[in-house]
Image (tube, rainbow, N blue to C red):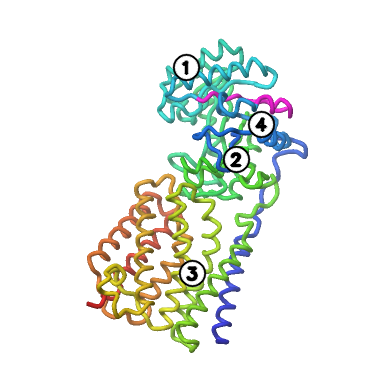
Amino acid sequence: MVRSLVLFALVAGGIGLVWHHLGQPVAMPPSPLAASEKLMCVSYTPFHGDQAPFSRPHIPEEQIAGDMERLAGLTSCIRTYAASGPEKTVPENARRHGLKVLQGIWLSRDKAENRREIEAAIKLARRYPETIEALVVGNETLLRGELSAGQVEAYLEEVRTRSGRPVTYADVWEFWLKAPELAAATDFVTIHILPYWEDDPVSAQNAVAHVREARRRIEEAFPGKAIWIGEVGWPSAGRMRERAVPSPANQARVLSGVVAAAKEEGWKVNLIEAFDQPWKRQLEGTVGGNWGLFDKVHREPKFQFGQPVSNHPRWRLVAGLGIVAAFLVFFSAWLGGSGQRQRQKEAAVVGMALASGLVFGWAALKLPQEDILPGDQLQGAILLVLALVVPMAAAFAVASGDRLHSFATALDPSRWRGQDTVTLVLAGLLVIAVVMAMQAGLGLVFDPRYKDFPFASLTGPVVALAILAFTGSNGSPHSGVAEIVAAAILLSSALFIIINEGIVNWQALWFSGLLIVLALTVLRVRAAPG
């Protein structure tokens, strides 16, 4: 008992030290802003919490007024994306707080909706001529393939003529090179430069250089034309894309660099975006909802320019949850060994406790951030339960001398008679873990752009099952058809993910490694009795 407590203390100390290190603030460059200086412009959408444009929710005016009050201390200008929905009250509230507005007009393939947007925007421009500096006629419409360049050009000319205000069209910088004819219909060119979302993703370290190069190419393509960088930013959370890592520190570093470059070069820049927008996770995965300068819960700034930023500000809670998970692994092993010393099995238990404890808290904190759709929420909840329960069951089994049995042990009721509870539970947990891993792996095969890598929640279960299968004697391995098919799916998914994501994406490598280990584990199961 004393020996087990000492080992647990060592594991707990290791977990605490790792997360203490990971939670340390990262130094940032000096602030690009003077003491009282504000950002040039920031994108704004008015949705809070579960509100989303799809459902056309009623947005109380006081909600928008509160947002304007916060933003007035940060920026001199806001960019909106629509005019006929809840955003129609933004110009009035912006005026009250001394904010200028780049008024958006949302264009789509729905011509009737386009007409409503245009009429609403022109009405606002005439009512607030001192507040609305320009009208942004369409946002990434060419990127989405909803309108042709000719249709966008016609809308631009109409709005310019009727509103008497400067007009522009906003799209990813490369689409301006594909439709240069639009420039003649605008008063200035508005480009989006999002290094994370490039077809060849750019790392945070190279993001500012990429922004410089993309803007230079637009400047060369449209000599003498004024240019706005209408969207530039970096996500604070979400999945990696090659070398592009979303994190709070990387967000602060990229935005600081862009603002500094804008001041140095005299660029006009609008940062995306003011507040995190959880509804975007339905379209772009976790990363889509985490581009804001303000968080989605407390609507407070995520960082201060020039101040150190922690990538894991809640590291104490993460470490605490992990230590609890590790303790449960040791306690389960003690129960399985009937309190007896099992020195030959201690290494296995320590390995399970470390694998579980190092990542369980991280997985728990990622759950509400990553999952928004009901199916994703269910998958995330099951994986989190597995992350806690599987290492406990495996530790009990390794201490009591039980081994891992085939899928049939759990799935064939005719084989249940005579089986002890631990054997049945372990076989059932193995089946569930394999199904969830296959679902996650295939998700990243068929939807590789937006799906997250659930490496944190899978690590504990996979390592625990592998240790159980590969330590000691597991009898004669007997892979049935189900096990062979499952292993093939896991291995092929892992191979595709590695090829598709590249070896520089450590999240992809971690997750793929887990799939490979689980596939090998499945092939090590003992034959079901009978």
- Indicate which disc residue 48 carries: 2
**Horizontal and vertical percent for residue 468?**
39, 75
Q: Nearer the viewer, residue 477 or 417?
A: 417
Mark with earlier residue (1, 2): 2
**Real-space CA distance between mark 4 and mark 3, rounded to the nearest whole angstrom:** 49 Å
Q: Which residue is mark 1?
A: 153
Q: Residue at x 68, y 22 (%)?
A: 131
Query: Is 139 left or right of 408, judged from the image as shown?
Result: right
Q: Nearer the viewer, mark 4 or mark 1?
A: 4
Query: Which stretch did the figure color magenta?
Result: 91-106
Mark with earlier residue (4, 1): 4
- The crowding category of the residue bearing disc 1, from other C-alpha atoms within 10 Å (few below 14, some 14 to 19, many at least 20), is some
For the C terminus, the image quarter is: bottom left
Q: Residue at x 48, y 22 (%)?
A: 113
- The crowding category of the residue bearing disc 3, from other C-alpha atoms within 10 Å (few below 14, some 14 to 19, many at least 20), is many
Q: Secondary structure at mark 1?
A: helix
**Horizontal and vertical percent for residue 256?**
64, 42
Mark with earlier residue (4, 3): 4
- Indicate which disc residue 355 carries: 3
Q: Are marks 1 and 3 in contact (CB under 8 Å)?
A: no
The amino acid beneath tag 2 is His
The amino acid beneath tag 3 is Ala
Q: Which residue is mark 4?
A: 61
